[in-house]
Image (cartoon, helix red, strand yellow):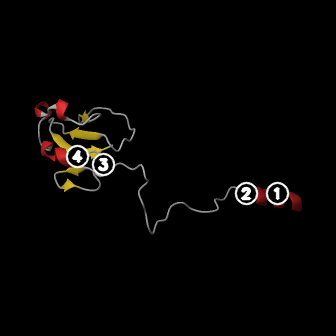
Amino acid sequence: MLRAGLFALALLAACVPTHRHDNPANPEPPADAPAPPIGPGGLQGDDTCGMAAHSTWLGVHESAINRASLPAGARVICATCLVTQDYSPGRLNLHLSAEGRVASMRCG
């Protein structure tokens, strides 16, 4: 019976993590986290896709955007559109409001 108890204890000990990867005192975003958006308040964070160069599009209606002038791979995303969730730091995403105006921009 003692052997069975020791075996069970050893088995349970093997399931306990030996270290923690997260540090609540110093939280850091994951390396593949999306870049902060640019919105009415301005750019917030790194600009990995050139969104600052296109910040004049904020508030502009979708029909007025010259899509040929968008960077390669850029997406114009309507308020109800479904998009893939893959992260590409060099891709510019323009998010439209329900009225069809550019409400925010985000890299990814």
Q: Amino acid at mark 4?
A: Met
**Mark 1 vs mark 3: in front:** 3
**Mark 3 vs mark 2: in front:** 3
Residue at which label 1 appears: 7
Tag 4–tag 2 contact (CB < 8 Å): no
Looking at marks 3 and 2 on the same chain, the residue that comes earlier in the sequence is marked by 2
Label 3 crowd bin: few (<14), some (14–19), many (20+), radius 10 Å: some
**Mark 4 vs mark 2: in front:** 4
Looking at marks 4 and 2 on the same chain, the residue that comes earlier in the sequence is marked by 2
> Is 3 positioned to the left or the right of 69 in the image?
right
Residue at which label 4 appears: 51
> Is 38 positioned to the left or the right of 32 in the image?
left
Q: Please, is residue 68 above or below residue 44 in the view?
A: above
Tag 3–tag 2 contact (CB < 8 Å): no
Marker disc for residue 48: 3
Residue located at (85% from left, 57% from top): 4
Label 2 crowd bin: few (<14), some (14–19), many (20+), radius 10 Å: few
**What whole-number distance in Å separates the C-alpha atoms at marks 4 and 2?**
51 Å
Badge 4 element: helix
Which quadrant holds residue 84? top left
Q: Amino acid at mark 3?
A: Thr
Q: Amino acid at mark 1?
A: Phe
Badge 3 element: loop
**What whole-number distance in Å separates the C-alpha atoms at marks 2 and 1?**
9 Å
Q: Amino acid at mark 2?
A: Leu
Residue at which label 2 appears: 12
Residue 1 in view of the camera: no
**What whole-number distance in Å separates the C-alpha atoms at marks 1 and 3?**
53 Å
Label 1 crowd bin: few (<14), some (14–19), many (20+), radius 10 Å: few
